[in-house]
Image: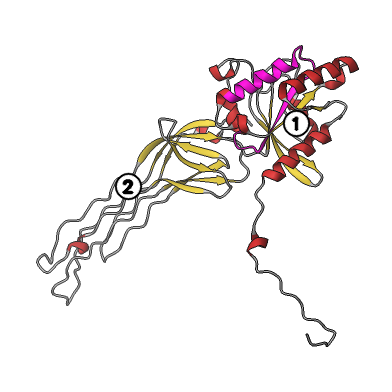
Amino acid sequence: MKFLDETKVHIRSGNGGAGAVSFRREKYIEFGGPDGGDGGRGGDVWIEAVDGLNTLIDYRYQQHYKAKTGVHGMGRNRTGAKGESVTLKVPAGTQVFEEDRETLICDLVNVGDRYRLAAGGNGGFGNAHFKSSTNQAPRHANPGLEGEEKTLWLRLKLIADAGLVGLPNAGKSTFLATVTRARPKIAGYPFTTLHPNLGVASIDGREIVLADIPGLIEGAHEGVGIGDRFLGHVERTRVLCHLVSGVEEDVAAAYRTVRHELEAYGHGIAEKPEIIALSQVDSLDPETRRDKVRALADACGKAPHEISAVSGEGMTGVLRALRDVIVAATPVPNDAADSPPAMDEPSDDGSDD
C-alpha cells in the first residue's frame, strides 16, 4: 500500500429541501386551510478518525464528497426527511486546513474524534407556517438554504511514542526492522526510506510505537534532498532517538547537521528529549570506536549509546532509555488522588478505646 500524508479534498453539504404549498381538501370540511410541510435539512459533511488506517491514500482516487439534499416538504403537514450525511474517514493524527494550507480547522488526535466540516442547509418553511389571522390561505413557501462548499487540505502526522532521526544510512530502518516486526526497505544507498514507517517494539512488557522517517541532509529545510516535510511525523512523539552512523568520518559534524535541521524546522522538535546512539559499531575496531564515542559525546554533551543492529549490542539499553522517557512523559491518571481516603478498619479485639 502506498503512503500519502497530504491531500486536497472538495466537499459540499446538502441543500435544504423546499417547503410545500398545499391546502387541505376533504369532504364535509368547508374551510380546509394550508397544510404544506417544511423541507428537510440537507446532509452534513463530517470527518472522523478511525482505527486501522495509517495513510490518506484513499483520497488520491476520490477528492469530491457531496452530501444529499433534504427531501422537499409535502401536503398533510408532512416534513421532508433530512439528507444523508457524508463522513470522511481518516487515520488518527490527521489535521484539516483551509484552502490556504495554514488555517487549522481541527486536529483529530484520537480514534473516534469527529468534526463537522460543513453543515447542511436548513429546510424551507411550508405554507402552513405562514398562516395567520390576516392571511389564512398563504400561497407561498420558502426554498431550502444552500449547503456549504469548501476546498480543504488533509495533512497526516503519525501518532508514535518515539521518532528515529539521523542522516541517510544512519541505520534507522535497520534499527526499526530489528526491534519491531516492521519491514522497511533497507539498502546500501542514501534515501532508501522515502516515506515514514511505523513499528511496535516491546521492552519489559511495555509496547513502544516507533516512527522511522527519511534521512535528513544539510539544507533539508531549504528543500535539499527530499526536504524536511516528513519531520511532521515526529512532532507528536515524546522522545527522539538520534542515530549517528559509526562509519561517518566525522560523527560530531553528522550530529550537528541533523540538530541544525531540527532547529530550522521548528515546531518544538528540537526541544524534545533526545536519546543519542552511535550505530553500526560492529564495523569499527576498538581504537576507532573509542575515538568516535568520545567525539560524539563532546558534540552532544553526554555519553551516547553504542549499538549494533547486526550483533544486537546495546539495543535493549536504547529501548529501555526510550521507555523511561516515554513513561516519565505519560500523564498519570489521578483517579487515585480523587478517591476519598481509606478509613481505618475497626479493631476486633473487643477492647474499648
- Which one is nearer the viewer's eye here, 259 or 53? 259
| Percent coordinates x, y for residue 99 in the rendering | 40, 32
Disc number placed over residue 280 in the picture, else none: none
Q: Amino acid at mark 1?
A: Leu
Q: How is the image coloured?
A: secondary structure
The mark that comes first in sequence, 2 or 1, is: 2
Look at the picture and state if 60 lies above or below 128.
above
Question: Disc 2 on helix, strand or loop?
Answer: loop
Look at the picture and state if 148 lies above or below 155.
below
- Which one is nearer the viewer's eye here, 36 or 180? 180
- Classify residue 69 as left or right of residue 18: right
**Residue 107 seen anywhere in this rendered image of the structure:** yes
- Which one is nearer the viewer's eye here, 240 or 19? 240
- Classify residue 46 as left or right of residue 303: left
Disc number placed over residue 15 in the picture, else none: 2
Disc number placed over residue 176 in the picture, else none: 1
Q: Residue at x 67, y 34 (%)?
A: 273
- Classify residue 112 as left or right of residue 28: right
